[in-house]
Image (cartoon, rainbow, N blue to C red):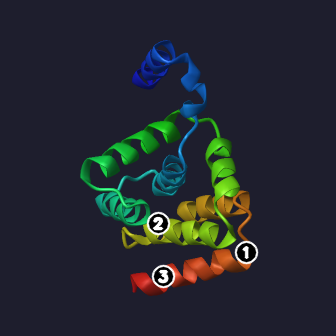
């Protein structure tokens, strides 16, 4: 967190006009929400981390170090953020409804990547889906599709 604060002040001193650039990008917002799901059960599973990297690589056309950096930034943001508002509002602003449903599907796929169903992960996905204004029917459809793909 201290490095994030230092980086912020270094960027502000170097370029005070870049204040608007401090908002999270769409990629970072989506990655942060996925990290929230991954950490919902308080266990860090290597299979979920691998799945997260693959999802980000496929969804945002990123490679190698860019994916690693995005995951590291997302995890840092999630650890230091108080709520999900900045991430959710950015996603709602720029993603249409089908794309928000795809994000919820990705959340389910990530939650099931470790081969276990955990009620805390479902609870977190339900909260995020509600905040993203994804309907309950689409929430359940995403869950069933992720379970079928996992089987």
Residue 57, given in percent of the width and then of the height, sits at: 35, 61
At x 52%, y 65%, the residue is: 107
Q: Mark 3 points at which residue?
A: 147
Residue denoted by label 2: 111
**Circle 2 crowding by C-alpha within 10 Å: few under 14, some 14–19, many from 20:** many
State if disc 1 and disc 3 touch (CB < 8 Å).
no
Q: In which quarter of the image is the C terminus?
A: bottom left
- Secondary structure, mark 3, is helix
The residue identified by callout 1 is 136
7 vs 138, left or right, is: left
Does 107 sit left or right of 71 as displayed? right
> Which sits in the foreground, 2 or 22?
22
2 in relation to 93, above or below: above
Q: Earlier in the sequence, mark 3 or mark 2?
A: 2
How many numbered discs sit on the rendered protein?
3
Structural crowding at the residue carrying mark 3, measured as other residues with C-alpha within 10 Å and reported as few (<14), some (14–19) or many (≥20): some
Name the foreground residue: 61 vs 57.
Answer: 61
Residue ID at (46%, 71%): 109
Q: Which secondary structure lies at badge 2?
A: helix
């Amino acid at each position: 967190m201290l490095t994030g604060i230092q980086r912020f002040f270094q960027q502000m001193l170097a370029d005070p006009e870049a204040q608007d650039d401090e908002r999270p990008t769409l990629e970072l917002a989506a990655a942060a929400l996925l990290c929230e799901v991954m950490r919902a059960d308080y266990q860090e599973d290597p299979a979920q981390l691998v799945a997260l990297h693959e999802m980000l690589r496929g969804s945002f056309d990123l490679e190698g170090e860019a994916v690693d950096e995005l995951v590291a930034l997302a995890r840092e943001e999630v650890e230091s953020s108080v709520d999900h508002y900045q991430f959710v509002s950015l996603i709602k602003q720029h993603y249409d409804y089908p794309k928000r449903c795809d994000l919820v599907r990705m959340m389910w796929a990530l939650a099931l990547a470790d081969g276990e169903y955990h009620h805390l992960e479902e609870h977190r996905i339900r909260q995020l889906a509600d905040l993203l204004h994804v309907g309950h029917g689409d929430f359940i459809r995403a869950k069933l599709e992720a379970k079928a793909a996992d089987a």
